[in-house]
Amino acid sequence: MITVTILALDNVLASSVMGSMDIFCQTGVTWNHIVGKDEITYFDVKIVTQDGKPAKNKNQAAIHPNCAISDIDATDVIIISSFSDFHTVETSGKALEWLKDHNKKGSTIAGVCAGAYILAETGLLNGKTATTHWGFADDFRKRYPKINLQPEKIITDEGNLLCSGGCNSYIDLSVYLVEKYCGREIALESSKAMLHDIGRNSQEPYTVYQFAKNHTDSKIQSIQSWFKENYNQPIDMKVLAENFGLSRRVFERRFKAATGNTPLFYLQRSRVEAAKNLLETNSRPFNEIAFMVGYEDVSFFRKLFKKHTNLLPKEYRTKFCRE
């Protein structure tokens, strides 16, 4: 039997604890019951806290653990659940040493959403890939510059170190681990029984792009403001640079240094974000929307939209239309 230990920290998000536990505990049980097969228990799951006391959250619903972290001598998998207050990072010192110890023992360790911060604090992710909630990407990169953050992904897998994206990605992570330990067939059966999708690995459809503005280059800030007001106009980057008193080469170098992106990427992403909003809020045909945000070549913009959102415009509208 595969042993899974779910770590609940201060300000825990209860769903990432109990939801993960439910997925592991029903694997081999619910599906087998439905189809008339003998039930099989694949996972032995325990909830732990740093001190063995209940973990409280802002919903005032305490998570009662089976034991303290010090009571776990060995476990196959550790899930670091998510939490709603980043002060939790500062109060998790005992957990950091415990995680490093179990990493040496060969445990697989996975951080859900903000739980990736705890895994990052151990130093185990340095030089490796990680993900977290897309909205935390800038903060995560500033805190942990040695980690290759890939916020577009729902799951990153570095063998025995895994991370997952936004808080409900505990579902994707749990199903992924079921497949990793029990095989594709069992994971598919579990997903069908619990009505979970399987195989998702992109947060891009849900992302609101975070345009970098917290820098000190005032001229680039002015250009960013100009882009915001004029993104849908025909733009010649050379002329734009000259209008702000810069050569094109200096403009592109300073823009990339300040924002982390090229001016062209910034412009394209601005247009994609505008198109997303239009797809969500009205029923105009996409060729009209493409023209409204600055593109006459609808085919090109459709491909660009898919590149940045991982969805075709029609799929995006179906998923997120507010009407």
Image (cartoon, grey):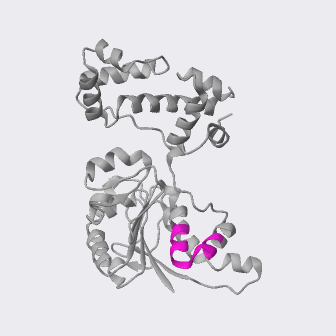
Residue at left offset 47%, top offset 17%: 234
Look at the image and give the residue range highlighted in magenta.
174-188
Name the quadrant of the C terminus: top right
Residue at left offset 65%, top offset 42%: 315
Residue 275 image point, x, y percent: 56, 30
Residue 209 image point, x, y percent: 44, 38
Residue 28 image point, x, y percent: 63, 80
Occupied quadrant, residue 190: bottom right
Front-most of residues 199 and 236 = 236
Residue 298 image point, x, y percent: 60, 28
In the image, is residue 33 above or below residue 11? Answer: below
Residue at left offset 67%, top offset 41%: 318
Q: How many marks?
A: 0
* Magenta part, dominant SS: helix
Left or right relative to 229: residue 277? right
In the image, is residue 100 above or below residue 166? Answer: below
Task: Judge whether residue 200 is colored magenta.
Answer: no
Q: Is residue 18 visible?
A: no
Left or right relative to 313: residue 98? left
Occupied quadrant, residue 310: top right
Left or right relative to 90: residue 175? right
Of all residues, the one furthest to the top in this rendering is: 243
Occupied quadrant, residue 99: bottom left
Residue at left offset 40%, top offset 82%: 75
Front-most of residues 139 and 287 = 287
Q: Is residue 50 visible?
A: yes
